[in-house]
Image (cartoon, rainbow, N blue to C red):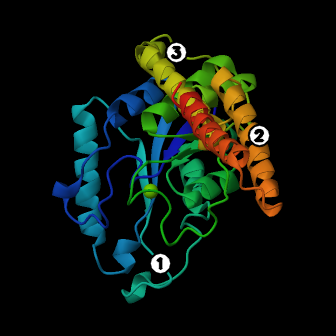
Amino acid sequence: MANKAVFLDRDNTLIEDPGYINTPEAVKLVPGVELALKSLTQAGYKLVVITNQSGVARGIITEEQLETIHAELRRQLAEGGAHLDAIFYCPVHPEGTVVEYAKESDLRKPRPGMLLKAAAQMDIDLAQSWMVGDSPRDVEAGQRAGCRTIRVRVPGPGHGPTTEDTDEDTQADLTVRNLVEAAKAILRNDSDGAADLAFAGAGTSAQAQATAAGAAPVPPLPAQAPDVVPAEADLEAREIQREILACLRQMTTPEDESAEEFSVPKLLGSVTQMLTILLVVVVIYRLFQHDTGPETTIWGVVALIGQLMALTFTAMHKNR
Ligand SMILES: [Mg+2]
């Protein structure tokens, strides 16, 4: 029987990406990665890193240095009880400065070459596999290989698509915030089947979206994997509630908040204001008639008092 796999982007998915990493000391795992990988291995997935490393073509790093970085990545994962089954990288780039690497390649994401190569070498059923990464090109490569896809959208500056990503509209089957959430979505989909892919996404993030095309039921989750999944269930539920509340607050615009509502002071203020305007009109009319007698003065004073009352009622309404 063919294997199923989770193909993993490296930078910003497995390890933090401060730019080009060219020393093992710079390798820093994204928190929770070991847990996510362990749970996927327990569920029977081969874990295969699929990474563009154009730093080699640009002369920033050699393939030998890249090997030491990957050895360090494996070492840190092993400390957490996790392991990778394979690492595929593409060192070339058409604009590279190192002549032998300055070329285009079908291996380079968003092309699916590395996934196809891994599938051939490791007997992987691509339709039963997932591609997880933070860039649109990861999603595109996964889709072109026939895998289901999960986009990890890391919040904050310096994350997300790079200048090499041109198609930000590439839609993954699911969008999550980190690899732990991605693993949970995959495991939940395993246990619930394709019909529940939408639920898996919704439970993962408010941003989650489920376009379950291509999703197919896969074998049930092994007994030990759920130990990992429910551990954060409560936290997750609370987080979702917070996100829903935040959305609801956003839906109540400032305009809505200041929406006029009925109140007695407001009614009195409106009536008083109308009477005041009427009195002012009468006073102006009398003045035009050259009637400057005491009666006109009285009406003028009453109008002034009416205006003050109208303002007072309006203030009372707003200060409720
Ligand atoms: Mg990346």
The residue at the point 72 percent across, 34 percent down is 270
Question: Sequence order check: which comes first, mark 3 or mark 2?
Answer: 3
Type of the residue with mark 1: His
Q: Residues within 10 Å of mark 2 (few under 14, many from 20)?
A: some
Label 2, secondary structure: give it.
Answer: helix
Tell which of 188 and 275 is nearer to you: 275
Foreground tag (1 vs 2): 2
Labels 1 & 2 near each other (Cβ < 8 A): no
Q: Which residue is mark 2?
A: 274
| Residue lying farthest to the top in this orientation | 223
Q: Position of residue 45 (x, y in %)?
A: 51, 32
Task: Give the mark nearest the N terminus, 1 or 2.
Answer: 1
Label 3 residue SS: loop
Ligand 1 shown in quarter: bottom left
* Amino acid beneath label 3: Pro
Label 3 vs 1, first from the N-terminus: 1
View extreme (front): residue: 293
**Residue 77 x/y as whole percent:** 28, 38
Q: Which residue is mark 1?
A: 93
Residues at discs 3 and 2 in contact (Cβ within 8 Å): no
Which amino acid type is shown beneath numbered disc 2? Met
Residue 313 location (% of width, % of height): 60, 31
Residue highlighted by disc 3: 222
**Label for residue 266?**
none
Mark 1–mark 2 distance (CA, rounded to whole Å): 76 Å
- Indicate the secondary structure of the residue bearing disc 1: loop
Placement of the N terminus among the 4 image quadrants: top right
Vertical order, 38 against 6 (above or below): above
Q: Is residue 112 found left or right of 163 in the rendered image?
A: right
